[in-house]
Image: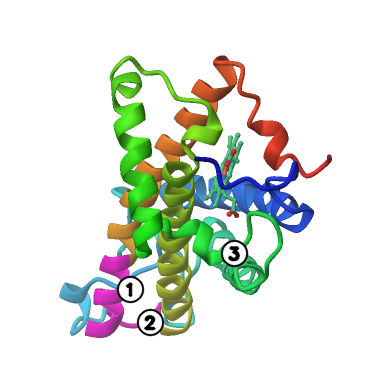
Amino acid sequence: MSDVVTNEVYARPIRIFHSVFALCMMTQLAVGELMDVPEVEKEYEASIQWVTSAIAHEAHHTPVVVGGAVEKTPGFEMHELLGLTIATLLLVRIILAMSSLPGANWRYLFPWLFAAGRKQLGQEVKLQVAGWKQIKLAAPEDGESVARSVHGLILLASVVMGVTGTLLFFGWSTTAPQVEWVEIVAEVHELVVGALEALLAAHILAVILHQRQGHDIISRIKPTA
Ligand code: HEM
């Protein structure tokens, strides 16, 4: 049932990518939750005091107004910088996904796109469902398609975050209320982050369970052999 054909499950570039990407993503999610977003509220648009309020993730801080613009907070600037770094990392992962390096190809990440992959997914789910109910996981080789589907969805959600984030980087205004397309893109950005967090929670829980069951999957993805 396993599609592992070599001892090396993940090629070295994927292992290095994972360490850098995981660190950037976890930092980014924390920064995104904590930062203040410099935003001009609509109700102040016609008023002289239109720059009096910045809102972000329910936090209420008095914004600093410099030269007619709401000043960006250090948290927001870090979010922008990390976001562009993550978008670049994702471009690297997309290039790797077109290679035949072990564990890199996009076909591994989206088994549900192919009839054989869907069949394997079905078999794995059937095999594992009783264990899941007892919070137990099958050996990694009996759950490759399920794990890879989760990894694929994590990367897909990250790409959506990266694309919407890059659009927001260029479209976000600190001097006027956001135009309609920016508001829509921001909504998608916020919606997808919820899905991404749920997938990451499942990913990290699965890693913990595998380790506790002695499957040592960490050694498959460690950057050092
Ligand atoms: C404490 C944090 C984390 C640990 C311990 C961890 C551990 C692992 C392990 C052990 C694997 C290999 C699974 C297998 O055996 O097939 C893996 C793969 C993967 N992880 Fe993580 N992970 C962490 C955080 C993250 C984060 C934050 C992300 C993304 C936002 C992420 C995305 C991925 C992806 C996409 C793969 C598949 C490799 C690839 O195709 O690029 N992981 N992780």
**Going by the image, does 187 lie left or right of 19?**
left
Along the line of sight, the residue nearer the viewer: 134 or 107: 107
Q: Which callout, 2 or 3, points at the residue further toward the start of the chain?
A: 3
Mark closer to the observer (2, 1)? 2
**Going by the image, does 36 lie left or right of 87?**
left
Question: What residue did someone put label 2 on?
Answer: 175
Q: Is residue 14 visible?
A: yes
Against 55, residue 168 (above or below) is below
How far from the left and from the top, in percent, is residue 176? 32, 82
Question: What residue did someone put label 3 on?
Answer: 105
Instruction: Compute the Cα span from label 2 to label 3.
Output: 44 Å
Q: Which callout, 3 or 1, points at the residue further toward the start of the chain?
A: 1
Against 59, residue 178 (above or below) is below
Q: Amino acid at mark 1?
A: Val
* Some atom of ligand 1 lies within 8 Å of the CB belonging to the residue at label 1: no
Range of residues picked out in magenta: 172-188
Q: Amino acid at mark 2?
A: Thr
SS type, badge 2 = loop
Q: Is residue 76 visible?
A: no
Instruction: Compute the Cα span from label 3 to label 1.
Output: 48 Å
As for residue 202 lying within the magenta part, the answer is: no
Please report contact status of discs 2 and 1: CB closer than 8 Å, yes or no: yes
Question: What residue did someone put label 1 on?
Answer: 51
